[in-house]
Image: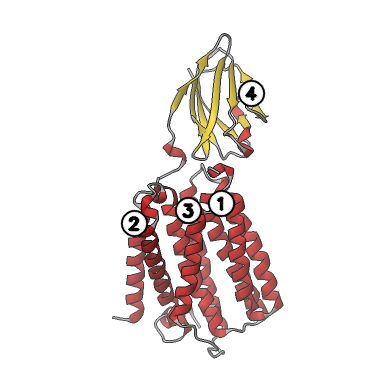
Amino acid sequence: MSFKEFTKSLSNNGPEGELIKTIFISLLTSFALLGILYYLSFRYSSSFLPKYGFFAFFAILSYAVILPSVRYVRSYKEFLCMPGMMIGMTMGMISSFLPGFFVGATNGMFVGSMFGMAIGVSFGVWNGKCCGIMGIMEGVMAGFMGGLMGAMTSVMVLNDHLKTTGFIIFLISAFILFGLNYMMYKETRESERKYKDDEFFVILLTLILTAITLWIMVMGPRSFLFGN
Amino acid sequence: MKKTTVYIALTLIMVGLLGYLLLENSNTNVSSAIQNSASADSGSNFQKVVLSMQNYNYYPNTVTVKSGQPVRIYLDSSVQGCYRGFTIRSFGIAKYLATPSDYVEFTPTQKGTFQFACSMGMGRGTLIVE
């Protein structure tokens, strides 16, 4: 159950072996969607890349690191209360903070926090239910807090190293999710895999998340600070 | 080669490609894009400065005024929210300018460069006293 064993298991055929593959599939899907949208619409807007490029890039990377954990939780379905609460809290917090931060940076506090909360609470409940009501409650609370905090942080640092902050926040969040995957690995050594999602699950979720995020960033409502 | 190694390599390539395409034309810093300088209007007995808002910051965000002459700073109607709380810490100025006709007035007696900001420090700029 050591860390070394975990890294070795990333090559096996079990749920752990799907973690890196999921990141790749998610990135590939986002890349394809972005290419299509850019060809059809965004290329006509000269301000797309300067205004949204950085934030779209990190939003896409965020979904690529969040989705493997979602898939991993679903593989085992049930966890004890303590790890289940940690799963609900971590998924709720990270999946609300990152979208909230990047959308908040382009659309303002209200839209960013609402979007972050919607994603975070959904993911928090979805993943937190692996241990019952305690995990669900943790997921809701963390999603609610993370969405507000993410958007608030980006608006607060708009004129003070916004992009550097976004980069650092992404790195820390990715590290936290990696830690969560390791924790789940340790907790499930005595368990059997209960469910297997196919690649379509990752593709569909990525398409939905990326499409909504890009749409909100480019065409969604925004606060007075951002032009409307 | 192991399957995982292939996926890691492909993932890194994908990140690099996405980063190249999306970040290539991205601004390095939103606020650094604004480096305009504006001289204040020298009125009869005070220097009038009107700040507006562009790219999530005060515009112009570099203002030059003369030493020893009173300065009035106004915020036009494009300035909203916490940006209407105007502060120059070096001069002890912190005032909420509710309407475009409200202003802060002070007389800079010392030459140098001073920072002004909104009450939350989100909008910032530089006041140069010559």
Q: Chain of mark 4?
A: B
Q: Which residue is mark 4?
A: B103
Disc 4 to disc 2, how far (Cα)? 45 Å
Q: Secondary structure at mark 3?
A: helix
- Amino acid, disc 1: Pro
Q: Position of residue A181 (x, y in %)?
A: 52, 75
The subunit letter for the residue under badge 1 reads: A
Q: Which mark is residue B21?
A: 2
Say which quadrant the N terminus of chain B sits in: bottom left
Q: Chain of mark 2?
A: B
| Figure colour scheme | secondary structure
Q: Where is residue A96 drawn, in percent x and y?
A: 58, 62
Neighbour class for label 3 at 10 Å: few (<14), some, many (≥20)? Answer: some
Q: Are marks 3 and 2 on the same chain?
A: no
Can marks 1 and 3 be said to lie on one chain?
Answer: yes
The residue at which mark 3 appears reads as: A218
Mark 4–mark 2 contact, CB under 8 Å? no
Left or right of A109, for residue A33: left
Residue A4 locus on image (x, y percent): 44, 79
Q: CA distance from mark 4 to mark 1?
A: 31 Å
Q: Residue at x 55, y 76 (%)?
A: A183
Separation (CA) of disc 3 from disc 2: 17 Å
Q: Is residue B46 above or below residue A223?
A: above
Residue A71 as seen in the image, left or right of residue A11: right
Crowd rating for badge 1 (residues with CA inside 10 Å; few <14, some 14–19, many 20+): some
Which of the 4 image quadrants contains residue B9?
Answer: bottom left
Mark closer to the observer (1, 2): 1
Q: Which residue is mark 1?
A: A221
Q: Are marks 4 and 1 on the same chain?
A: no
